Amino acid sequence: MAFSPLFSGVRDGRVANKVIYPLAGLLFVGVLLFLCRLGSRRQIRWLLQTPLADQKFRELFGVGSVPHGDTVDHACAKVAVDDVQAVVSGLVRTLIRRKMLDDWRLLDRWFVIAIDGTGNLSFSRRHCDQCLTKRHASGAVTYYHPVLEAKLVTANGFAFSVMTEFVENPGLNPDKQDCELKAFHRLVDRLHSAFPRAPLVLSLDGLYACGPVFQRCKDSHWHWVVVLKDKDLPSVEQEFQALAKLSPENRLTLRSGKNLTILQDFRWVNGIAYTDDARRDHVLSVLECVETSPGDAGVLVTKTFKWVSDLHLTPKTVQPIAGDGGRSRWKIENEGFNVQKNGGFALEHVYSENPNAAKVFYLLLQLAHGLAQLLEKGSLLRRLVPGGFGSNKNLASALIEAWRFAPIALAPSCAWLLEPFQLRFDSS
């Protein structure tokens, strides 16, 4: 079966003698739920079940019909979350091994991993023992489940989920709630275990401008570019301002954008010594970019960006480190979370009340979003439909209609899925 190998490593926790649908088939339907942007589990019944769709499913998985959404939910409640995470991470590992992302390495060496947190589920009542809680001034309590994501981001707009860490309390009434910084250290351990030799640069926001994070990156043999706000690391900021005045050679002015209307003025300082609270010594570089660009009605707008890093800065490297290493972090928000929340994937929808199943659905969403990006930016779909679909929403609608009504000879169609093929991206 063409899709079974993808989920072959996911252990089935259901009672064996009561199983009707193979686990691979149920997880496939879970991915299809997000790939077609159905928005809720109940839509499986209304939009994915037709006689032709049942025939396709039977050819693929040997079972008579597309399963009900509740059946998918029951299976997701019984599988190990780590096994599904391995499938999601495996997609990125395959792209790296096949050298398909090499065109977007930072300085032709490192893959950029942006790490950031986002809201996932929230409730007005306690959902489970692991809920985080927030008490409002009105006395109301919100119970919520944020996540911390590591995504591989590229200049052409890819944002592939690499690793997910669920931010949750260990039980009722903890001494201290879980938080993003605590989750970061758990995520780093798992990320290093899954990609022990991958050349990585972490792109992080100002929350991570601290000694423990710098040390964890150093221990993992990773580089890092972290947003530096005015109130973060005051001794480093003070030394940067003093040394920058004494190093006029460390300045670079560039123009970019359409008609060269964006002016970027860079200045930087290398070799700034910093000792953290644990008395560990670090050598840091600070990079500042003052950017002036046309705003509304042609009025010029000036913004200042600043980063701290362990990378040595030179006139040849400051622009790519600032653009691909620092500002690419926004892609985890724009091409990542924003698309998943507002682009039809419905990230914040409660796909299951079961805590384990909710995590599995979240990871299936990440897998579907990765596959959607390969469809949208890859050469296979352009070859089949040169004119495109006009929008990703239209592409999702086309996938639904193809699944529901496309009269294809299924046995031959499955055979080509097992054959090797080439997928190329536009790197211009």
Image: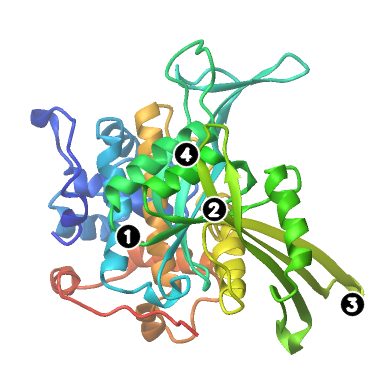
Tag on residue 184? Answer: 4
Q: Position of residue 272 (x, y in %)?
A: 62, 54
Q: Which residue is mark 1?
A: 198
Relative placement, left or right, of 183 versus 423 is right
Between the C-alphas of marks 1 and 2, the distance is 23 Å
Amino acid at circle 1: Ala
Helix, strand or loop at label 1? It is: loop
> What's the distance in space between the residues labelled 2 and 4, CA to CA?
22 Å
The answer to whether the residue labelled 2 contacts the one labelled 4, judged by CB atoms less than 8 Å apart, is: no
Give me the residue at 64% from left, 57% from top: 307
User: In the rendered view, would you say 391 is above or below 183?
Assistant: below
Q: Earlier in the sequence, mark 3 or mark 1?
A: 1
- Residue type indicated by callout 3: Gly
Mark 4 and mark 3: Cα distance apart in space: 41 Å
Q: Name the image colouring.
A: rainbow
* Residue annotated with mark 2: 283
- Give the residue type at disc 4: Phe
Q: Which residue is mark 3?
A: 298
Residue 40 pos. (x, y %): 47, 43
**Badge 1 or badge 2: first in the primary sequence:** 1
The CA distance from mark 3 to mark 2 is 41 Å
